Amino acid sequence: MSKPELWVIAERRLDHVEPTTFQLLTKARQLAGDRFHTVAILFEATNDHLETELQPYAPDEIRIVRDDRFPTATDAEHADALAQLVAQYQPNSILFGATITGRSIAPRLQAKLLTGLTADCLDLRFDDETLVATKPSYGDNIMCEIICPDHRPQMATVRPNTFVAEPATGTAELTPVTVAFHPVERLQVKTATPVVNTATTVGDASRVVALGRGAANTATIDTATRLAEKLGGRIGVSRPLTDLDRFTHDDQIGQSGNTIHPDLILNFGISGAVQYLVGMQSAKTIVAVNSDSNAPIFDVADYGYVGDANAFMTALLAQFV
Amino acid sequence: MKPKTIVVCIKQVPETNEVTIDPQTHNLDRRGLAGIMNPFDKNAVEQALQLADQTPAKVVLLSMGPDDYAESLREGMAMGADAGYLLSDRAFAGADTLATGYVIAQAIKQIGEVDLVLFGRQAVDADTGQVGPIVAEFLHQPQITYAASLRLSGDNEITAERLLEDTKQTLVAQLPAVVTVRSELNTPRYPTPRNIQLSFEKPLTIWHHDDLDLDDSRLGQAGSPTIVTKVYEPKPTKRELTSLTGTPTEAASQLIKALKAHQLI
Ligand SMILES: Cc1cc2nc3c(=O)[nH]c(=O)nc-3n(C[C@H](O)[C@H](O)[C@H](O)COP(=O)(O)OP(=O)(O)OC[C@H]3O[C@@H](n4cnc5c(N)ncnc54)[C@H](O)[C@@H]3O)c2cc1C
Ligand SMILES: Nc1ncnc2c1ncn2[C@@H]1O[C@H](COP(=O)(O)O)[C@@H](O)[C@H]1O
């Protein structure tokens, strides 16, 4: 008997594949072992070759729908096409990135298939062939494990940057597939303007200097900026600091900001609320400086100093050569 | 021109997200938590009211939940909505997003001749944002999710902006349609004393199971493909803390040594 299929729906971001797709392909491989057949589903225009971006993550197979209409298709048109593929291949499970696009198409597909969909997952595992998805609720204060025992496919959207993308060896089989395009007449995309965001975000940095309410005055931020430069890293902030003119939501770490996996994060004047911690707790090395020895941030830190943020930063800078 | 009918789906949620787990039952402990209208749904109500300023329209609120959800419906009517429907029945309890979307879609069909259905971006307790697209599919209507702006652009047409991660889209839909709104698109109004008073004279209809045309196998727990098998409070993974001690200069030098040892600097 052939193996059950575990699908990852590749998402496009301008002319490239959205990075969450790579993270999901990596996780899918780990989950699959040799029990599942991993498949990336890719919609692309006739002249595109986005499969070359997927190949390094080595799914067992990449199914490619080539049709110039899909890259700009609406949610319902995508869901319709996916429903056709599901009817043809009967996958066990389907993973989407919990991006705006993923979170718009997946529930529409779910309603077509009358199956279960777990949103914004922070972990996935299989018990036999049952997908166990961990989903936060109540603003990340509560975690739920959710299964969909009697309906297939099992579906989940997964929060970006929850898993780390790692290239793998293996050769994906490329399979062209066709589906009928059923246009939704009553909805037109009139204009689509690319929003080019060239600024590297705190999410890409391998070294992060993170500032919280206890490190929010101008002098401290200036010192931190120099420290971040010395480290070749970036500044990130807890949510209260996004109210300052110097920072935006793009700089925010945490549940409602960026989930990051840097090699090193130095936290200054951050108490360590759970909504902040979920965004950074998988950093390889965590350093915390806080004037309150009882701050929860120390529970998750590898190195901690009880004291003033600016004084410590200044001392650290002075000793860098 | 016939006035439009705009339905806004609202959910009632606990006033705070600081919920805990009952150590005995392992269930959520929501005792003593008052209910409020899901904050994101206020943006949807506000948007409906603004559209009703543009064109003659009736704004109807719809909520599925226990009887005390009537409070949120009153709150919405105090903001200015014209009427409310509460879908309340034991048979609806335990519904996941699919079963919730089914009952809401059936109720919208029952209201009849609905031009536009608005949703909040997500409920702050469940945080899924799925019910809107599910209802759109069940109604076979076009959907615009995460709308950043929304206006009537013709007799029977809406125009919305949608900000995807990489693209800003302008979408035009012929009514009827379903739209879920971002919270950035407006600032919800506060109820005025006069509107609060008026809200008690507005019709609030409760529909039970038998008032709707329903397939029982699609309701409540039986109609919900997903099952919650475990709830817990996340505990950040504790790490072994090495304390840096002494003056800032001494502590900084200890850190530099450690980071060098780990080849981090
Ligand atoms: C639904 C929801 C989503 C949220 N999402 C996020 C999110 O994505 N990201 C996020 O960050 N927050 C988020 N929050 C908010 C979060 O709960 C906390 O309120 C926030 O993280 C606190 O930020 P902070 O640690 O900077 O401030 P505080 O909690 O005020 O902590 C300041 C710390 O600085 C220390 N301090 C003061 N002076 C000094 C000094 N001179 N030197 C050193 N230390 C000093 C204090 O001891 C204290 O520990 C969210 C909340 C909710 C409800
Ligand atoms: N029980 C409900 N009754 C009415 N509307 C609901 C209900 N649950 C969810 N909604 C609507 O669907 C949106 C998304 O909810 P959710 O999918 O639960 O995050 C909410 O913002 C509401 O507009």
Image (cartoon, coloured by chain):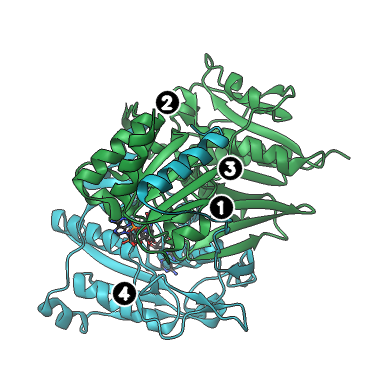
**Label 3 environment density (alpha carbons within 10 Å; few <14, some 14–19, many ≥20):** many
Q: Which callout, 3 or 2, points to the residue nearer the camera?
A: 3
- Image mark 1: chain: A
Residue lying at 21% horizontally and 62% vertically, measured from the top left: B188
* Residue beneath disc 1: A121
Question: Which amino acid type is shown beneath numbered disc 2?
Answer: Leu
Q: Is residue A286 visible?
A: yes
Asked if disc 3 and disc 2 are in contact, CB closer than 8 Å, the reply is: no
Q: Which mark is residue A14?
A: 2
Sequence-first tag of 3 and 1: 1
Find numbered disc 2 in the image and state the secondary structure of the residue it sits on: loop
Q: Position of residue B216 (x, y in %)?
A: 61, 72
Q: Position of residue B89 (x, y in %)?
A: 50, 81
Q: Is B193 placed left or right of B100 in the picture?
A: left
Q: Is residue A270 above or below residue B96?
A: above
Q: Which callout, 3 or 4, points to the residue nearer the camera?
A: 3
Disc 4 with disc 2 on a shared chain: no
